[in-house]
Image (tube, rainbow, N blue to C red):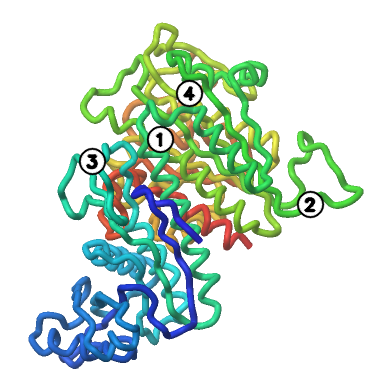
């Protein structure tokens, strides 16, 4: 499969059982041995000769994140008809535990490869007794592709003719920022590796798609762009798409979405994508309004604030440019649906909803003290217009629960700055009303390398949201801000099992990892895909 790269070329990924080396670069992994013995490495002609001098000198012994670039000895060069130009060795140190360790190894390896002029890279899986090669290659491939990501859409290109695959930005001469010629990755391994590599590459592609959406500026990604991308995905893969505009929202009584967008010239959009994993049983056709989709249904809701100024409760100007990232929840949901559309999971329906809007302080903007009525009839006193995400999500959640009768609901949102105060940029907040669903999502995040920390919910928090003039108010004092945001949303899901993921601290500036760039991380995509892949 191919992953569109922001360097205007494709990285083609394939797997092979052949031991022949394809391309100009060989990538292998070397494990240090306790006691200082020779490192453990793949058994391949000429590799030991590559390593011998560096090991004897002590310059490279296979420690974690050590990198050695060497040039093939005659035996290795002749075996590849002179095509092989370099060998890149990456140290593993002590055995890594779990897939996250291998993702980080993949990120380190890609950084090393990108510093060379590699075009086609043959990857030899690490030698390990702990896990089958297929289990290692999946996160390894994922980490490599995620680390290859660059967003360079808005850089100027130097004038004049371009030669070969090398193209440099007119704005930088930094070698690490210049465009890499890398075009192909070839993973060698046992039979069955192809499926593993394909699924890993598809997942990495989806994460990079979410990063692309988030990297777009506010004038490059609007609510209409969410609708356009959803329609395109639906056309390509036979999904059902519905886009509710302002007029439809007025008819449905979605006062939260309408209120948030009052100050913006950009019209709001509620995007609904439906994937049906099993057909309706013959003779059992039911009204969806009455009984939802047949079979288990997972509802995913992602906040799609394409820019958030705070509205009348204006944010400080310092750092406000980062509020283009307030749509990362919606981006994660849309990107995850691309994987669902391609993998076609059986026995489960997936409904994705993205309430998309802008929050600006225009002349008609929502004001502190205004009272609005959400979908379903609950009234809300707006104390702070910068607590707008929950107003969007409340409409989407209430509508989705009533319309589709889901088995479970998961929402993702860059909802509160308070979650950064509580958890920093290392974990996302998780809150929910169902222990089993919370455990499923926590486990999916652990497998995906996207960690969460569960925070409490309860009636004592809901009391803080009581208003003297309406059913609810959208915020209280600063105390327990993340929990109160979730407590507000809980009012709109009824008894349906539900989990809320507050990703404000991890959607961008996520904790430093070799495969996560500065800026938007694409956090949440892999959790959702893992949850769906292991739903049963």
* Residue 508 in sight from this viewpoint: yes
Q: Position of residue 378 (x, y in %)?
A: 59, 22
Mark 3 vs mark 4: in front: 3
**Mark number for residue 415?**
1
Query: Disc 3 and disc 1: Cα gap in Å?
Result: 40 Å
Could you tell whether 282 is left or right of 70 in the image?
Answer: right
Q: Nearer the viewer, mark 4 or mark 1?
A: 1
The Cα–Cα distance between marks 3 and 4, rounded to whole angstroms, is: 59 Å
Secondary-structure class at tag 1: loop
Among the two numbered marks 3 and 4 on one chain, the one whose residue lies closer to the N terminus: 3
Residue drawn at x 50%, y 55% as measured from the top left: 441
Q: Nearer the viewer, mark 2 or mark 4?
A: 2
Q: Quadrant of residue 386?
A: top left
**Where residue 391 appears, x then y in whole percent?**
49, 26
Residue annotated with mark 3? 158
User: Of helix, strand and loop, which one carries label 2?
Assistant: loop
State the CA–CA distance, disc 4 to disc 1.
20 Å
Q: Nearer the viewer, mark 3 or mark 1?
A: 3
Badge number at residue 517: none
Which is nearer the eye, 470 or 28?
28
Q: How many marks?
A: 4
Q: Position of residue 293 (x, y in %)?
A: 74, 44
Badge 4 is on which residue? 466
Left or right: 166 as drawn, with respect to 499: left
Q: Work out whether residue 280 or residue 313 is closer to the camera in this orientation and state it.
A: 280
The residue identified by callout 2 is: 279
Taking the spot 61% from the left edge, 20% from the top edge, the residue there is 249
- Cα separation, mark 2 vs mark 3, equals 53 Å
């Amino acid at each position: 499969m191919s992953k569109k790269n922001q360097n205007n070329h494709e990285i083609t990924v394939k797997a092979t059982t052949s031991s022949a080396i394809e391309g100009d670069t060989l990538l292998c992994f070397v494990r240090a041995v306790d006691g200082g013995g020779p490192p453990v490495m793949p058994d391949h002609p000429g590799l030991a000769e590559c390593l011998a001098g560096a090991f004897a000198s002590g310059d490279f012994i296979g420690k974690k994140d050590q990198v050695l670039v060497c040039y093939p000895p005659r035996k290795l060069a002749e075996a590849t008809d002179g095509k092989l130009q370099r060998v890149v060795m990456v140290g593993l140190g002590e055995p890594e535990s779990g897939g996250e360790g291998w993702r980080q190894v993949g990120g380190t390896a890609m950084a090393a490869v990108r510093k060379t002029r590699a075009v086609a890279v043959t990857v030899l899986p690490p030698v390990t007794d702990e896990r089958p090669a297929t289990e290692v290659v999946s996160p390894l491939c994922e980490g490599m592709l995620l680390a290859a990501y660059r967003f360079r859409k808005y850089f100027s290109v130097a004038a004049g003719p371009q030669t070969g695959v090398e193209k440099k930005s007119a704005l930088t001469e930094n070698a690490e920022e210049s465009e890499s010629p890398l075009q192909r990755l070839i993973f060698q391994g046992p039979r069955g590796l192809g499926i593993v590599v394909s699924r890993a590459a598809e997942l990495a592609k989806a994460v990079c798609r979410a990063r692309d959406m988030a990297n777009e500026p506010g004038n490059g990604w609007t609510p209409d762009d969410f609708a356009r991308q959803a329609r395109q995905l639906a056309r390509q893969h036979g999904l059902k798409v519905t886009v509710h505009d302002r007029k439809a929202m007025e008819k449905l009584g979605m006062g939260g979405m309408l209120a948030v967008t009052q100050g913006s010239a950009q019209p709001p959009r509620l995007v609904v994508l439906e994937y049906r994993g099993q057909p309706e049983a013959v003779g059992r056709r039911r009204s969806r309004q009455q009984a939802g989709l047949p079979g288990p249904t997972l509802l995913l809701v992602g906040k799609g604030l394409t820019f958030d100024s705070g509205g009348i409760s204006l944010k400080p100007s310092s750092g406000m440019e980062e509020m283009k990232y307030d749509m990362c929840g919606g981006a994660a949901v849309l990107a995850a649906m691309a994987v669902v559309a391609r993998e076609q999971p059986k026995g489960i329906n997936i409904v994705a909803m993205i309430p998309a809007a802008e929050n600006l302080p225009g002349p008609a903007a929502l004001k502190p003290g205004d009272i609005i009525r959400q979908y379903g009839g609950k009234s809300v006193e707006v104390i702070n217009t910068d607590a707008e995400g929950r107003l969007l999500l409340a409409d989407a959640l209430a509508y989705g629960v009533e319309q589709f009768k889901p088995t479970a609901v998961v929402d993702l949102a860059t909802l509160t700055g308070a979650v950064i105060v509580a958890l920093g940029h290392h974990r996302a907040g998780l809150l929910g009303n169902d222990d089993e669903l919370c455990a499923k999502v926590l486990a999916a995040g652990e497998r995906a390398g996207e960690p969460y920390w569960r925070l409490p919910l309860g009636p004592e928090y809901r009391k803080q949201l009581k208003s003297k003039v309406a059913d609810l108010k959208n915020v209280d004092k600063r105390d327990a801000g993340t929990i109160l945001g979730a407590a507000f949303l809980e009012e709109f899901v009824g008894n349906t099992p539900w989990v809320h993921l507050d990703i404000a601290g991890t959607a961008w500036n996520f904790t430093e990892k070799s495969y996560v760039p500065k800026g938007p991380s694409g956090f949440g995509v892999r959790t959702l895909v893992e949850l769906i892949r292991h739903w049963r």
